[in-house]
Image (cartoon, rainbow, N blue to C red):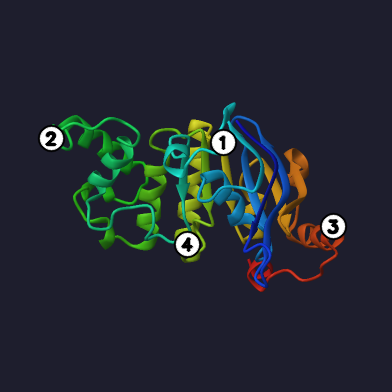
Amino acid sequence: MLKVEKISKTFHPGTINEKTALDGLSLTLEDGDFVTVIGGNGAGKSSLLNALAGTWQVDNGTIMIDDIDVTKMPEHKRATFLGRVFQDPMLGTAATMGIDENLALAARRGKRRGIKAGISKAERESYRELVATLGLGLEERLTTKVGLLSGGQRQAITLLMATLQRPKLLLLDEHTAALDPKTAAKVLETTNRIVNEHKLTTLMITHNMKDAIANGNRLIMMSNGKIIYDVKGEEKKNLQVTDLLKKFEEISGNDQMSDKMILG
């Protein structure tokens, strides 16, 4: 479903601020893979997701999604293949519009739009049923402006929006990092249900090692713009946080992980 070959990206080349974000990185995801991504600050995790989303063009390499070369495709066209949820609950939704209106926008993404009435009765009922699956009681508040929701509620709605059209690739950029532990656990539970139910190919960045081990069928660790560890199946299931810390030290030659990751 995803094939990345030797992509590189350097910001501010030739200046004192030169930074290599991605360094000849290659990655292949099979259809239905749920991959968690960990690494220290500046490892290249978000840079990888931005490269896949087309936020900026890579300097070298190719990106294929479902056998389609999207390497040079602009971000707005690439969005046809992708769903994305950001770390900030304020991103990804229109704060001044209702829950139903936000879902309608997501449902119409990439489609031709006419001048007929905004949301039909049948559509509103389908949104009600969809929102009810979250178990947050929001199905009775469909007209509530999204900006009035809590961070966790908003992130759950954003997740529904990102997966409404069953994207070829779902990108989760630390989407629980800004939430309290209880709310983060609820959003992760919802994430697993949606990903597993629809067999969505997913990349999820997290700073929480326990979450990285507990979720998905595969785990990759990044450092200095490269993938330095890739594990799946039973080997992944049997991992402990101490194993990951040790592996990071062995492979990267660095005994320093961010405090946020270790505490997570």
Give the residue displayed 47% in from the left and 62% down from the top: 182
Q: Secondary structure at mark 1?
A: loop
Label 4 vs label 2: CA separation?
Answer: 39 Å
Amino acid found under the numbered disc labelled 2: Ala
Amino acid found under the numbered disc labelled 3: Ile
Amino acid found under the numbered disc labelled 1: Thr
Image quadrant where one finds the N terminus: top right
Q: Mark 1 highlights which residue? A: 201
Label 1 vs label 3: CA separation?
Answer: 27 Å
Mark 4 or 3, closer to the camera = 3
Left or right: 239 as drawn, with respect to 213 = right
Mark 2–mark 3 contact, CB under 8 Å? no
Image quadrant where one finds the C terminus: bottom right
As drawn, the label of residue 169 is none
As drawn, the label of residue 251 is 3
Label 2 vs label 3: CA separation?
Answer: 58 Å
